[in-house]
Every structure is written in structure tokens, then in C-alpha cells.
Amino acid sequence: MANTTSGTVIFDKNFAVDQIIEEAYERLGIQASSGYQLKTARRSLNILFQEWGNRGVHYWEVDETDIDLIEGQAEYTFFRSTSDGTSSITTPANTYGVADVLEATLRTDRTAVDQSDSALTKIARSTYSAQANKLSKGTPSQYFVQRFVEKTTFTIYPTPDATNAGKAVHFFFVKRIQDVDSTYTDATNVPYRFVPCMVSGLAFYLSQKVNPQLTQTMKLLYEDELARALAEDGSAASTFITPKNYYPNI
């Protein structure tokens, strides 16, 4: 009789923080038993997640939403976090922890069948600074993102006029990975693809504290597993290459 399978694919959601820490310590030949070992490992895990933010866009943290345009208002603010983890009152509820805005479009008739989007161009600080009158009103065509310690600002140009008030900007944004708090039975905000490199990365970070002789080995394992996860992560799309026609002078 053939053996049956579990029928589930929820290991990453049942892989709690305390188990992640235990696995990382075991790779270093240590049996974690003290409260401080849990605390210092949790701190290292949060630092690891912040370091991942420097590796590029993580597609499981990409979200989308609308913001309503207000006549004469050019800048819209998204706070990174507040004491209760929610966004500011001026932004949609799912936009806390905004790290960057990826793409944006001006959207009209959001609930109608004839909804229409027109792409906005993301510009650099120097380009926005060169605009002569940043408060001139019209139909927005560009946006400029500034990323601060506690907030991210989204500035559009031109500033919406009366004909564009009530329209919306629909945008895709990338959020920060959620923190690991003191509830060690929680799961992490990481998909299954990144579970191996998360554990390897934590073992690498902890080795620097408790077993420096293994640091180089742990680093190689971590970077190898992270590279595979980053290569697999993403959104596949078709690519078409068209040769350029060249007609020599005859």
C-alpha cells in the first residue's frame, strides 16, 4: 500500500520564530536555552530583514492602492510606522511601512466600466528641482519620491487643478518586511522561498557573536541560498528581441 502525503503546504506559516532561532543555533552546534539567546537572535533576525531591503525589491511585499487627489495639494505622505503599526490618517490603511513607489498612473472613473489610466513618469530630485513653478496646476504627469527615516513622500507635478480633483493616483509600492516581535510563536513575514536563506542568514549573523570560526562558512551558505531565492523570486514576463534593420547606402 502506498504511503499517503500530508496534503498540506503550510510549513512556512507553522515555522515559528522560536523554531527558526533554534534551527540557527543548532547549525552552530549550540542548544539555545536562555532568554537572552532568544532576545539577541530576534534582534539579529530583524537586522537581517532590514539588510534584505538593500538587496532590492521583494515581490511578496509589493502592494497597490489609490490615493485621492486634492486640488492644489502636490505632496502626499506615507509614514513608515506609528506606535500601533498603522499608517497616518492621510494615507490608505494598507500603506504603512512604504519603502518606495514603483509605478504610478493617473486613474479616472475608478468604478465605471470606462476606467482609464495614464502613466505617470517617475523623476529624480534634480529634475523636480529644475521645475520653475512647482505649484502650477494642471493634469499630473510626473511624480517624485523622497525616502526619509520616518516617512516617504510622494510629490506629483503639475499640482492637481479643479478638473483633476476627485481623480486618483493608482500606484504600486514596496513595503518593509514586518518586524519580529517578542511573540516567539508567531510566523515571520517571509514566503516559503526565503525560509532556507532566512535560517542560514540568522546562523551567519549569530556566528559572528558566538562562534566566529564558523562565520565564513555560514556566510558562504547564506549567500548561496539567498542568491537562489532572489533568482526565483519575481514576476516572469515574455521577452521579445527584434533585430534592427540596417540598409547600407547603395
Image (cartoon, rainbow, N blue to C red):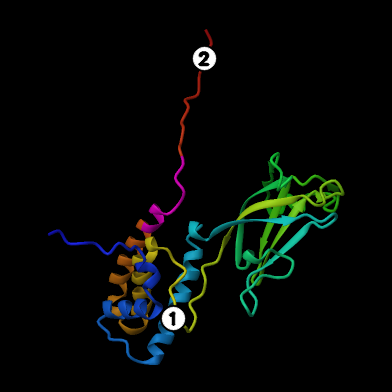
Q: Decide whether residue 225 is among the magenta residues.
A: no
Q: Which mark is residue 182?
A: none
Which residue is pictured at 81% across the width and 48% down the height? 164
Q: Position of residue 206 (x, y in %)?
A: 36, 79
* Residue 117 figure quarter: top right
In the image, which residues are magenta?
A: 229-237
Q: Secondary structure at mark 1?
A: helix
Residue situated in front as seen by the camera: 169 or 116: 116
Identify the residue at image location x=75%, y=52%. Answer: 156
Q: Which residue is mark 2?
A: 247
Residue 189 x %, y %: 47, 69
Q: Nearer the viewer, mark 1 or mark 2?
A: 1
Which image quarter is the N terminus in?
Answer: bottom left
- Which is more N-terminal, label 2 or label 1? 1
> Where in the figure is residue 94, as x and y percent of width and height?
62, 64
Which label number is shown at residue 42? 1
On screen, residue 191 versus residue 173, left or right, reads left
- The amino acid beneath tag 1 is Arg
- Circle 2 residues within 10 Å: few <14, some 14–19, many ≥20: few
Of the pair 237 and 29, the residue shown nearer to us: 237
Instruction: Give amino acid for label 2.
Output: Tyr
**Picture coordinates of residue 90 (x, y %)?**
74, 66
Name which residue lies at 80% across and 52% down.
166
- Figure quadrant of residue 4: bottom left
On the picture, is 82 further left or further right than 245? right
